[in-house]
Amino acid sequence: MREIVSFVRKVSDNDATVLVLGESGTGKEMVARAIHQHSGRRSKPFVAVNCGALTETLLESELFGHDRGAFTGAVREKAGRFELADQGTIFLDEIAETSEAFQVKLLRVLQDGTFERVGGSRTMKVTVRVIAATNRDLRLSVQQKRFREDLYYRLNVLTIQLPPLRDRRTDIPLLIEYFIGLESPGTKTSSIVMEILQRYEWKGNVRELQSVLKRAALLARAEGRDMVRLKDLPAEILAESADLIDIEEQIVDSLRGKKFSRNAISETADELGGFNRGTVAEYLRGYCFKTFVEMKWDVRATVALIAASPEPDTRERVHKKLIEYLGNAVEMVDPALPAEQVGVNAKPKYKNLPQRYHAYLDDLIRSFYRREWNLGLENSRTIPSSDRRIGDDPA
């Protein structure tokens, strides 16, 4: 996108016709406005017309104006868009949707700036910079005799090809900040919302993104929030993004960034949005179980992996939380009881735990029942300095 911005700046301060190409919603009008704002015509009118939204007769009247009595209902004369844009810029969107008869008249305006109003005989002359846009392949339309070749060459003096939003994802954070700022200055997005918006396909391109953000910002503001959360996004985006976002990674990364401080869980819930404190705590509990199992009951390795920090205070907090979770998980596990009874007694420990961690809790309870590890260090307030497992006799 930097190349496009640079090109826009280069071509702005002249009067050459510009043809903007790109899928629907890619921001063609935004580019046209940017060209106008950076040109010497910035203090003059910028007039936008959607050529595809009007019939041929209405489009001609809209662009060139009409005299009184030109047709039924024309009770007074009306200036057309070209007159209104005189000395400024006119943006003709969906130019490929126009008829050949209209294209002939447009070609004349591009050649010498002259035209007549509908029903009039007086020749009008304007000085207007023309920027046209289309989501069609104009070369193909020319080959198919659906668009005049001479007009194509008149329009195609300077060309800007806008890539779809899915091909320029690095632009999304800037667009998010811009569009939310338009609706609700100071409002931000949670990190998980940002992740979802960056990964979404955006078939409607920039226009769809702007619509989604306008909705989200309004919902957040209505609840007195200054942060867009998951619940502010449309259901179809959340459904499509369900498999893209690793909630565990989001939560653990946020907790690490807060060094597992006293308020880290609550702050993470607020930051990510869409989660309450209990959900974040259950993901941390599950992640502790998972890591402990994968590290083969090694406390030191488990703490080091979860903390991802050499700071003793951070590791101390992780160690304390790990021992708390482990102790709670196996408090009802009595090796003297039958395995079936132990399973029944342990059922409450699965409540609220995300399904992805159930197998790890199974392994943890089973291994404790088999005396593969124990809680000999459950009251320890220091991080083990050697690679020993819970229950190993200290050296």
Image (cartoon, grey):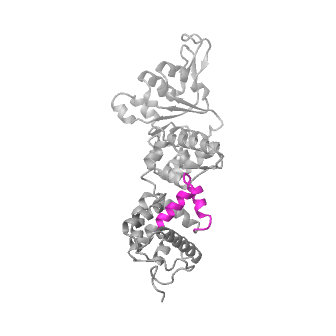
User: Is residue 308 in view?
Assistant: no
Which of 256/284 is in front? 284
Q: Is residue 376 above or below residue 76?
A: below
Residue 367 in the image: x percent, y percent?
39, 73
* Residue furthest bottom in the image: 395
Q: Is residue 205 left or right of residue 189?
A: left
Q: Is residue 243 magenta?
A: no
Q: Which residues are magenta?
A: 260-288
Which of 3/112 is in front? 3
Q: Quadrant of residue 126?
A: top right
Task: Please report the residue visible at 64 percent of the width from the left and 44 percent of the height from the top.
Answer: 223
Residue 313 in the image: x percent, y percent?
59, 75
Q: Which secondary structure is most common in the magenta stretch? A: helix
Q: Is residue 274 magenta?
A: yes
Residue 32 in the image: x percent, y percent?
54, 38
Task: Please report the residue visible at 43 percent of the width from the left and 30 percent of the height from the top.
Answer: 96
